[in-house]
Each structure stands twice: as structure tokens, then as C-alpha cells.
Image: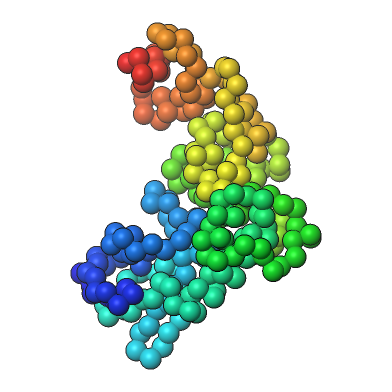
Amino acid sequence: MVTLIIDGREFKAEKGQTILQVARENGIDIPTLCHHEAIEPYGACRLCIVEISKGKRTRIVTSCLYPVEEGLKVKTDSPRVMSNRKMIAELLLARCSKNKVIQELASQIGIEQPSFKSEYLEDNDCIVCGLCVRACEQVVGVSAISLVNRGITKEPASPFLEPAEACIGCGSCYYICPTGAIKMEDRKDTRIIYNWKVEFKLKKCKVCGNYWAPEKQLEYIRQKWNLPGDFFDVCPTCK
């Protein structure tokens, strides 16, 4: 165990925990968009920055990546943190000016209008946090998509921008996206994930007749866990 100070309060924490984990466990709010407990931290959005002190030295770090240390002093809302966080929020708002999640987050931080010009950027909903890519790789184990290009053109995409052949249609990318940038729709017996240009036939339950999951996803799971061939003939509700 280590002892650290966050916003003037003393906490005990396990070695290996990050500042963000300890703060959240103790009810201290630190904003973030790219963090998910099931996925390794990446520090992409930078919103979770905090100011740390060790001796006379202070610096800004991303709390989702920085491990706790004995005697560490942390400030989550110091003037330096808030100034940097507002700058980050302005950049996100300039990129995604029409996205409600970003608008609300920026407003909470005190930004209503970005001071940066956005006319050179194509307005979109993606903040390039890579959560969709990491979920596909680390949770699903498929790696159907990746981050491509650099700078302002960087984005998650399927290989060569063609239909993502490795995608199983599970929708993990859609569900985990913090800004709703992934567009997915279940239309009758078909699931469509527009970003990756893929469509999937949905499995029909033999009991209730409802379509409930992509056949490709269920077959992937069945083979991975060596399940019987008829294991997914009935939906979870009817089992």
C-alpha cells in the first residue's frame, strides 16, 4: 500500500493503481472520454490531466496512466490543470463542434465557443481516442479496425478503407464509443455498421422468432469456446 494526497485529502492505494482509479474509488471526479475499465489506458483525450508534486517539482500528467507513489501530492483542479483542460476542451470542440457529448463536456469545463478556427477541419463526431480499436483488439480479439493516417486526418478505419472482412458485427466499437461516432443499425434481420461498410445476417430465435445477434459473431463465440452447434439456436431471453 502507498499513501498519497489528492486535493488535500489523504488516501491509501494499492501499488500499480493509477491516480484516476484511486480518485474515482474515492468519489473524486476527473473528466475523461477515452478511459474504460475493461481496456488498457491510452491517454488519448488528455482530459484527465492532473498536477502532481514530488518534492519541489510539479508537473502535469495524465491520471489514467500515472501510477500512484508514496507521498505523491495530486491536484485535480488547480489553476494550471484547469487552464490546460480548457485548452484541450477547446481543441475537441473545434474538431467536433456539433457533437452534443463534446458540447456538454466543454460547457461543464467553462467553454461555450472554441477560440480556434475549425473551417479547415471536416466536422465530425470522432475524437480519435481509439477506444473502438482497442475494444476490438483487447476485448473481442478480432482487430478488424485500426487507426490510420496522421495528424488531423488520423481516424479509426477498416484496412484500406474497404469493408472490414474480419469484423464479426458484435458492435463493441459502437457501444464503447464515447461520442457516438460509430453508426450502427439493426434493420429487421440485418445489422449494419456504416463506419466499416459491413452488414451481417442476424440470428433468428427458434422460440420467440426475434432476431437477436449476428450469426457471424455467434459462430465466432461458438468456435472459440467449442460450444455445440445448436447452442445459439435460442436467444438468451428464451433459454
Name which residue lies at 57% across and 17% down.
189
Dividing the image into 4 quarters, which one contains the N terminus?
bottom left
Q: Position of residue 200 (x, y in %)?
A: 59, 24
Whole-percent x, y for residue 13 in the image = 24, 67
Is 55 drawn above or below residue 32 in the view shown? below
Q: Nearer the viewer, residue 158 or 5?
A: 5
Q: Residue at x 24, y 65 (%)?
A: 14
Residue 174 can be seen, yes or no: yes
Q: Position of residue 155 (x, y in %)?
A: 65, 51
Colouring rule applied to residues: rainbow
Q: Quadrant of residue 149?
A: bottom right
Q: Is residue 68 above or below residue 137?
A: below
Instruction: Give the vertical position of 93 relative to 53 (above or below).
Output: above
Residue 2: horizontal and vertical position, in percent?
Answer: 23, 73
| Horizontal arrangement in the rendering, residue 121 relative to residue 192 (left or right) | right
Q: Residue at x 50, y 39 (%)?
A: 175
Q: Nearer the viewer, residue 215 or 57?
A: 57
Left or right: residue 81 versus residue 185 is: left
Q: Which residue is drawn at the image coordinates 69% and 69% (left, top)? A: 115
Q: Nearer the viewer, residue 176 or 226?
A: 176
Left/right placement of residue 139 relative to residue 1 reads: right
In the displayed structure image, the side of residue 134 where residue 146 appears, left or right: right
Q: Quadrant of the C terminus?
A: top left
